[in-house]
Each structure stands twice: as C-alpha cells, then as structure tokens.
Image (spheres, coloured by chain):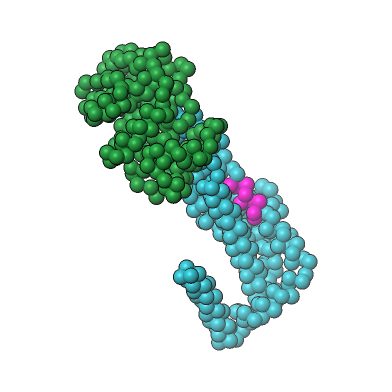
Chain colours: A green, B cyan
Amino acid sequence: MNIQAIDIKKSFGTQIVLSNWNCSIPENKTTCLMGPSGCGKTTFFRILLGLTQPDSGAIYGMENQTITAVFQENRLCNYLNAIKNIQLVCRDLDISRQKLEDIFEQVGLDRSDLMKPIAELSGGMQRRVAIVRAIVPKSTFILMDEPFRGLDTENKKRVINCIHHMTGGKTLLISTHDFRDVESLNAELIEMGS
Amino acid sequence: MKLFISKQNSKLKKILSILFWLVVWQMTSQIVHQELLISSPILVLKTLASLIFEISFWKTVFYSVFRITSGFLLANLFGIILAILSYRFATIRFLLNPLISFVKSTPVASFVILVILWFGSKNLSIVISFLMVFPIIYTNTLQGIVNVNQQLVEMAKVFRIPFLSKFIYIYMHEVLPFYYSSCLIALGLCWKSGVAAELIGIPSGSIGERLYEAKIYLNSAELFAWTFVIILLSISFEKLYLRLLAYIKTGIENSV
C-alpha cells in the first residue's frame, strides 16, 4: 500500500509551512523529495516520523510501517563508537560484527574508524554512520533528510551503492537538492513547491 | 612515560605542600607554646594513636558515619526521584520550588533546633545532612534532565529504543556530569553540616559529642584529633563515591 499524505496543513505561529500538501509515496520503491529550502520538506518528514502533529490532514498507510531515519542532523551518541551506535538501535538484530564492519567498509569507513568515539570522526564519517544506522535495522520505511550533505563525490557514490544494495524491497523517501541523486538512486520524484 | 613522571611529580608536590603546612603548624604551636590553644601535630598524632585503640572510638565513628552517609544517600534517592517527577510533571516542580528555596536559604542552626524539638537528637545528623544535600542534588539533576539532548530523545523514539537503553545511554549519560558536580559540593557539605548538627544537638555516642567534650575539658589535642578523623572520613567517602560514579560512567561508555 502506498503512503498517502492528504491535505496536510502545518503552520508555526503565523508562518504557514505546509498548505494542503498531497502526495503519494510508492510502496517498496525509492522516492526523492525535492524542493527549495524552507518549503517544508523537514516538517513533512517530522510528520511522517510522528514527531510533529499536522494542524489538519491525514497520512494513510503508516499503520504497519517500521520506520528508521536519517535526520537532518546526525543524532548519534557522540561518546559511543560507530558499532555501538548501531547496536543501540538494533540490539535484537541478528547481524554479526563482521557483517557490520563489511557494511561500514562499503561506505568507506575502515575498522580503526569504527573503534573511535563518534565525536572523534569527521562530519562526513559521522554522516555515513548515521546512514548505516538507518539501513541496517529491520524496517519497511526509511526516511532520509538530505543524507548526502557533507559527503564528497566518491563517498556519496559509495553510500548510494550501499543504499541500493541494502534497501531492496523497502520504501525509501529521500530529500535532496541535487537532481542527479534522483537518477543515481533510480528514484521516483516528488516536487514540493515553495 | 611523560605522563607517569608528571603524575609522580604532582603526587610529590601534594606531599610536599602537606609537609609544608605541618611544619607551619608545628612552628606556630612552638611559638604560641600553649597546648591548650594550639596543640602540636606530634601531640595530635599521639592522641589519635591512643584513640584508635579504644572500642568507643570505632563505635563513635560508626555512629556518625552511618547517620551522615544515610542522610546523604537518602537525599540522593529523593533528590533524583523528585527531579525526574518534576521534569515529568510541572505541578510537582512548581510545588517544590518554594520548598527548595526555603531549605537552601534557612540557616543550618535553625533546622538543628527544629529537628531536636520535633524528633530528638538521636537521628539529627541524618535529617540535617539530608536537608543540606537534597536541594543540591535535586536542582542539579533536574538541570541535567532539562539539558538532555532532545534530538537524541527524538531519535530514540523513531528507532523504538527500549526504555532501559534510552534511560542509560541517553538520559543517564547526559545527566551524570550534572549529578557529579552536585556530588562534589554535597559530599563535603554533608559532613560539615552533619558534624555541626551533632555538636549542637550532642546525640550520645556521636563524633559531635566527642568534639563537645573536648571543648568542655579544654582538650585541644583531642579536638584536633577528632577534626583530623572527620577530614579523613569525609575525604575517604568522597573519593569512594566519586570513584563509583566514574565507574558507572565508564561502564555506560563501554557497554551496549
């Protein structure tokens, strides 16, 4: 079942962020959400994640979804290392440490990086840990809010390959400002107006 | 190697500074030349050496240690629980605010007299050390909870992190530095206020009573010896408790 957003309205004080927003996110496919800054992409993500309540409107198709996410900020526990950050969100997951290390290697993080506390990693490395944290746990719907921000071309390519490899059959919604991401992710496109 | 040398150096400096003040003390007592006013460190040490072989000494130490640490631990328990409840329920916070301000600004002596009137002097040091420690623990813990990174809390909600993990790895880790700093203040204060309360209330078998007797009998050496015991107990309890907190922090960081 597709995820449907019907007539979503959201304003903060006098500022209207979403006005009668409608969209359909196809099931088991990758969709890119594009739009200028401030058009309400993050607010829409927060509504989908259940972190913000819309003023009116409804979201359908979220009932049985298991969600994971990459937030606009990395939101990692800075004092834990990369492996422990993953284990924190999926302790019951049947995944070996070796497999986790392999996944991290795919996104360009070697074993020595994984042993360091997150605070000691660069911004780009932290971003990749946040992405791995979203794609490793068992989930049906993955939301990524500007996941490639701060990544260089090479690492971005690696991350996109990893996303392709790891998220087959899942519903993905990725917000981006770069039209080339839509092509490389082989994604459907939803455009948001200002 | 460098770190080892600098650690050795700092230990040596510490010992030297203590020795310096002991020499100053010895010289002052020789200049004043009145054991009644200021006993020499050697005499204090001799008095202490004779005290520790008395059973009554250990009974007295146990009496005060048990009561003062009980007051401290109870204040921690109530302070933490009420801080969590205050964060969760604004009404509790509003109700507690005036009470905390009242306890903070009321002189210890007033509390001591009230507690003696209401409950007698036997458990005086428990109540007084509780009253002195509770507002510090409560205020700092609440401040710590308020400062918990809300972005991590949201992340935990989205990823459905179990309550216990969320409590340990997000809340506890973020609140611990606030709690730690409150303990640094409270640990010394509970001993100072607890013994001061015992000195006013003179509960039988307490360190306060022994200090009072030393004063009555003008036994300056015993007064100094008991003061030294209090300092030793206070520092030992402080080191032990702070080490426990550091152990908990390391435990959180090394386990998931």
What stretch of residues is rendered in magenta? B68-76
Q: Magenta: predominant secondary structure element?
A: helix
Residue B43 vertical position relative to residue B235 in the rendered view, above or below: below
Q: At 40% across and 29% down in the image, what residue appears?
A: A165
Q: Which of A100 and B224 lies nearest the eye of the viewer?
A: A100
Q: Is residue B72 magenta?
A: yes
Total numbered badges shown on the rendered structure: 0
Q: Does the magenta stretch include residue A81?
A: no
Q: In which quarter of the image is the C terminus of chain A?
A: top left
Q: Which of A94 and B17 lies nearest the eye of the viewer?
A: A94
Q: Which of B2 and A57 lies nearest the eye of the viewer?
A: B2
Q: Is residue A72 left or right of residue A82?
A: left
Q: Where is residue B118 in the image (x, y as percent from the top left)?
A: 66, 47
Q: Quadrant of residue B50?
A: bottom right
Q: Where is residue A84 in the image (x, y as percent from the top left)?
A: 49, 41
Q: At 49% across and 72% down in the image, what residue appears?
A: B5
Q: Which of B176 and A122 lies nearest the eye of the viewer?
A: A122
Q: Quadrant of the N terminus of chain A?
A: top left
Q: Position of residue B197 (x, y in %)?
A: 62, 58
Q: At 23% across and 27% down in the image, what residue appears?
A: A179
Q: In this view, does A2 lie to the left or right of B168?
A: left
Q: In which quarter of the image is residue A19?
A: top left
Q: Where is residue B9 in the image (x, y as percent from the top left)?
A: 49, 74
Residue B32 seen from this side: no
Residue A100 seen from this side: yes
The residue at the far right in this view is B55
